[in-house]
């Protein structure tokens, strides 16, 4: 009975944190649910044996033109076009182990769809790692040429790569593989997710991304030494004791803003007591939940209007008109 009561209290606290964050980030980011295990990924075949997401000839033409332009600019190698997956089912109220039905597409087609006014729900995974001993977390400052939210702070991650004819394995059937692959690409870190750490399913309305977020993954000292930046952005280390200042006090020296889902994920981690950290951990003398309250009170001022000062623009880099 006592354990059940504690579990119910934890569920109530979690629901309250989610409700508060969803209200604050309305229209910018939304927590759809908190799966208790990794989602199931299933392709949907629309014609014969093809799971390809159907698009119009106009979209194909835009994608082809964009491909040639990016190749000439040296921003895309000939023949390289990363596969990705578009969600095709409704997951507004996911269960403990949701099934994500998808159809495959590619990076250039997603850009072309955005050019046509769509916001395709691309399936992705994200995480921010942290070091318990060094008492710091790692954030990603996106490249200024990133397709969405250029130059903004975010978690690490990227799009799920489904198996295709040209990439037969891709990320298999697991968003855990997506998270691990993206983290290696963006930081050089090889992380091992613990089954007891929480998951979130998050929607980014302004870009369409659907993210499975791994809520804080501890990194050991050996792994921290292996970190290295990539062309996709820069690794930013933030000490626990400087986290409040880092989030709330923007200066000319630190002009970058946040991707909404990145800031939401970080706040959720604090609101849940910083899962993965010791219960005695402090952030400049505050518990994680006390820090969460301090930051939320600031961001909730003027009915949440203050939040806008801390969020970047999606500024989606679209292909030029055909």
Image (spheres, helix red, strand yellow):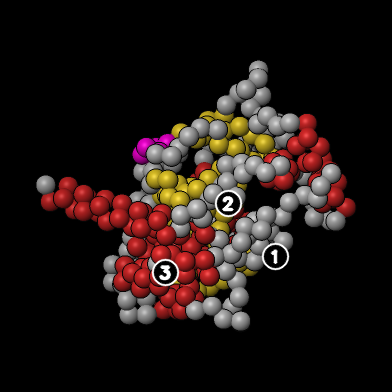
Image location (x, y in percent) of residue 122: 59, 43
- Mark 2 closeness class: few <14, some 14–19, many ≥20 residues within 10 Å: some
Q: Closer to the N terminus: mark 1 or mark 3? A: 1
3D distance between C-alphas at marks 1 and 3: 31 Å
Residue lying furthest right in this view?
Answer: 72
Magenta span of residues: 94-98
Image location (x, y in percent) of residue 119: 62, 44
Residue lying furthest left in this view?
Answer: 1
Report the residue at 61% width, 38% height from top: 85
Say which element carries label 2.
loop
Residue lying furthest top in this view?
Answer: 48
The residue singled out by tag 1 in the image is: 144
Q: From the image, state whether disc 2 or disc 3 is nearer to you.
A: 3
Report the residue at 25% width, 52% height from top: 12
The reply to whether residue 126 is visible in this rendering is yes
Q: Closer to the N terminus: mark 2 or mark 3? A: 2
Q: Does the stretch in magenta take in 300?
A: no
Image location (x, y in percent) of residue 103: 61, 32
The residue singled out by tag 3 in the image is: 302
Say which element carries label 3.
helix
Q: Is label 1 in contact with label 3 (beta carbons under 8 Å)? A: no
């Amino acid at each position: 009975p006592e354990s059940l009561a504690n579990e119910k209290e934890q569920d109530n606290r979690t629901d309250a944190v989610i409700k508060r964050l969803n209200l604050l980030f309305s229209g910018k980011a939304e927590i759809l649910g908190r799966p208790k295990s990794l989602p199931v990924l299933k392709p949907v075949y629309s014609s014969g044996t093809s799971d390809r997401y159907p698009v119009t000839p106009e979209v194909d033409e835009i994608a082809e033109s964009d491909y040639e332009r990016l190749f000439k600019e040296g921003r895309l190698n000939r023949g390289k076009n990363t596969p990705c997956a578009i969600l095709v089912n409704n997951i507004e109220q996911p269960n403990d182990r949701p099934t994500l039905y998808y159809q495959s597409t590619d990076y250039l087609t997603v850009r072309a769809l955005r050019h046509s006014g769509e916001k395709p729900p691309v399936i992705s995974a994200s995480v921010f790692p942290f070091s318990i001993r060094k008492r710091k977390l790692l954030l990603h400052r996106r490249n200024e040429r990133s397709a969405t939210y250029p130059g903004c702070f975010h978690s690490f991650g990227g799009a799920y790569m489904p198996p295709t004819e040209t990439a037969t394995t891709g990320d298999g059937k697991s968003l855990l593989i997506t998270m691990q692959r993206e983290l290696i690409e963006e930081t050089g870190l090889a992380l091992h997710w613990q089954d007891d750490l929480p998951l979130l399913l998050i929607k980014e309305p302004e870009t369409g991304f659907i993210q499975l977020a791994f809520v804080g993954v501890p990194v050991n000292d050996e792994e921290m030494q292996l970190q290295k930046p990539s062309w996709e952005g820069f690794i930013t280390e933030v000490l626990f004791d400087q986290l409040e200042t880092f989030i709330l006090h923007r200066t000319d020296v630190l002009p970058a803003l946040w991707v909404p889902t990145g800031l939401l994920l970080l706040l959720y981690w604090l609101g849940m007591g910083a899962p993965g950290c010791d219960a005695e951990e402090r952030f400049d003398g505050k518990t994680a939940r006390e820090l969460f309250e301090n930051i939320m009170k600031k961001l909730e001022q003027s009915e949440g209007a203050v939040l806008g000062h801390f969020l970047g623009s999606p500024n989606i880099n679209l292909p030029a008109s055909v």
